[in-house]
Amino acid sequence: MFYTIGEMAQKLDVAPSTLRYYDKEGLLPFVERSSGGIRMFKDEDMEWLRLLGCLKKAGMPLREIKAFMDWSRQGDATIDRRLDLIEKQRQSVLEQQKQLEDTLLMLDYKRWYYQTAQEAGTCAVHDTLSLERVPERFRPLKEAWKVGE
Amino acid sequence: MFYTIGEMAQKLDVAPSTLRYYDKEGLLPFVERSSGGIRMFKDEDMEWLRLLGCLKKAGMPLREIKAFMDWSRQGDATIDRRLDLIEKQRQSVLEQQKQLEDTLLMLDYKRWYYQTAQEAGTCAVHDTLSLERVPERFRPLKEAWKVGE
DNA sequence: ATACACCTTCGAGTGAACTTTAAGTCAAGT
DNA sequence: ACTTGACTTAAAGTTCACTCGAAGGTGTAT
């Protein structure tokens, strides 16, 4: 079962031009062509494309994704390098998770801040708010950051 | 206590040119200048800059961060819009967290895959590996994705 | 007073990841 | 055979977030 670039793009929710761009950059060396030159995507191609999307969302640059792809095609001699790359990226994801947690706490604080201000009709309520009326989870944040407005 | 752009950049671990760029884009309307035109950063400016860095790492474009900054300076009439923006970004962070968790599971699988391959000296071990020798946490992944190489 | 490090603006350049455009080809339906 | 819509390429354009270079000003130490 084959798909055209448009069908595959729809399945993956990306623009066809994006897939052409990836192909041009050598990230899709496996896609076959019809006699007329039209790309024919297979179901198994989607696995690699999903992995690609996953790595991309984790912040890996296309150049590194390509390196991984190239090494994969070179066989067992590149296992070490591939493992290194995976571990490097894994570390990066762990750091990003920590970062997002900090950001979420901050956003939760801001949300509470503006919800409170909305009810009062003014941000000025926060000037006259004693510390014990600030939810506990936000207190370390206020101290470490002194986040006001 | 005032800091020059270089000192502030060092504190925040960014390039001075980055801070000048942010200023040019209207993200730092509060920085004062000496009589000679040199930027004088205050300690409290760092709070906003840290918030900025936090939002940036959460994927918020500078244009939206600027909107938030502009609204903040316009006073209580913009509380609703600010709350909307915060909630939108909070939602985006929650989605990113889910995404990173998926990616981490995938990277953990790949790590196990290549560690196993490294010990065996070849990726071919995985062809002859029965399903019950694949760690349990990776099995749903294999099924949903059929991730091989 | 002069040296020196660091500051200023402005405009141009960079790199990543697409996206669009133009000119043309392919394949299916009538 | 012809129309139509989706495909092809190459090259140029876009957006984002910086980053750099040139030419000149600032401020402090000696």
Image (cartoon, coloured by chain):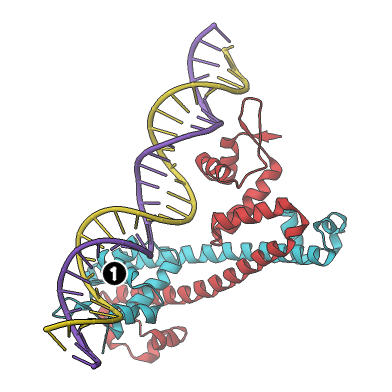
Chain colours: A cyan, B red, C purple, D yellow
For residue B136, which quarter of the picture? bottom left
Q: Which amino acid does label 1 sit on?
A: Arg
The location of residue B34, given as percent across then percent down, is 66, 28
Vertical comparison of B74 with B5: above or below: below
The quadrant in which the N terminus of chain A is found is: bottom left
- Residue drawn at point x = 82 percent, y = 63 percent: A121
In the picture provided, is A77 more to the left or to the right than A145? Answer: left
Q: Say which element carries label 1.
A: helix
- Residue drawn at point x = 29 percent, y = 69 percent: A20
The location of residue B68, given as percent across then percent down, is 65, 56
- Residue drawn at point x = 62 percent, y = 55 percent: B67
In the picture provided, is C17 more to the left or to the right than D25? Answer: left
- Report in which chain the residue with disc 1 lies: A
The location of residue A70, given as percent across then percent down, is 25, 67
The location of residue A101, given as percent across then percent down, is 61, 66
Q: Nearer the viewer, residue B125 or B55?
A: B55
Can residue A48 be seen from the camera position used here? yes
Q: Mark 1 points at which residue?
A: A20
The quadrant in which the C terminus of chain A is found is: bottom right
For residue B11, which quarter of the picture? top right
Q: Residues within 10 Å of mark 1 (few under 14, many from 20)?
A: some
In the picture provided, is A42 more to the left or to the right than B57? Answer: left
For residue B110, which quarter of the picture? bottom left
Vertical comparison of C9 with D23: above or below: below
